[in-house]
Amino acid sequence: MTHCGRVLLVEDDKFLRRACEASLRQRGFDVATATDGEEGLRLAKTPPFADVVLLDLLMPKVPGIEVLRALKADPATAGIPVLILSNSSREGDKRQAEQLGASGYFVKANLSLKELAAQVEELVKHVRPG
Amino acid sequence: MSDPVDLDRLREFSDGTDEGLRALARLFLADSDETVVELAGAVDRRAAAEIQFLAHRARGSVAACGAARLAEILLEMESLALQGRAADAASMMPSVERELREVQTFVSASLLSVG
């Protein structure tokens, strides 16, 4: 399978993590996974950096919103696009994620693995033009 | 009563192909017990914060799969736990387990029907 970008998936739910990981791998992405915010932040800040981070919000140890804040505050990782995966469809939560620099927001109840992969691919194209 | 899983939603969650649906269904059947076992442990301990967290986590994956009734039960459990009503939240555990069995049975049957 063609290597088409590096994705870091930070999600504590095993089923969703494995479903997203399998779908992205099938499409040729190189996927690293973390099961809590602390591990996610550590992996995100460790080179080689991911091209895209997929981030759950409510997670053990460090909440996703704090992971997002920390990534955007660090010049080394501020440019990495972050897509949020959340149970919440509240406008306030979406707005907060966008204000902190998230590139997209997926509500799990409406999640489509196909659409998720398409958006990841689009973001990777911007990060790795050509 | 409606089906425990909206199969159209499950297809929408997957890549839309029968193979994608089968792969997702297999993963769900393999993993769906795990969080509920953890949830049952938190319920036994009447640990409200843990019940809230685990009910929330389980809700995300079952909602993604189109198991709306189970997602609703978990949302109620999560809300009760958030209010510190651990005993009330705990009283919902049999409903969670019963509905999960329904969902798993339906997903297994769907898996057979797509070959």
Image (spheres, coloured by chain):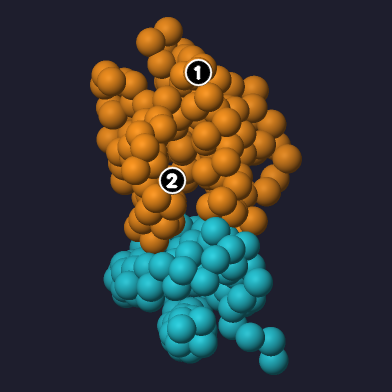
Which chain appears orange?
A
The picture places residue B68, in percent across and down from the top left corner, at: 62, 72
The amino acid pointed to by label 2 is Arg
Residue labelled with disc 2: A27
Q: Is residue A98 visible?
A: yes
Residue labelled with disc 1: A130
Work out whether A21 lies above or below A104: below
Q: Is residue A60 visible?
A: no
Left or right of A94? Residue A65 is: left
Q: Quadrant of residue A48?
A: top left
The front one of A112 and A59 is A112
The picture places residue B45, in percent across and down from the top left corner, at: 31, 69
> Which color was chain B given?
cyan
Left or right of B27? Residue B63 is: right
The front one of B3 and B77 is B3
**Count of number-bearing discs:** 2
Q: Quadrant of residue B2?
A: bottom right
Q: Secondary structure at mark 2?
A: loop
Query: Given the current orientation, which residue lies at the most extreme bottom position?
Result: B1
Sequence-wise first label, 2 or 1: 2
The picture places residue B111, in percent across and down from the top left corner, at: 46, 82
For marks 2 and 1, give the one nearer the viewer: 1
The picture places residue A21, in percent across and down from the top left corner, at: 38, 49
The amino acid pointed to by label 1 is Gly
Q: Secondary structure at mark 1?
A: loop
Work out whether B101 lies above or below A126: below
Q: Quadrant of the N terminus of chain B?
A: bottom right
The front one of A7 and A108 is A7
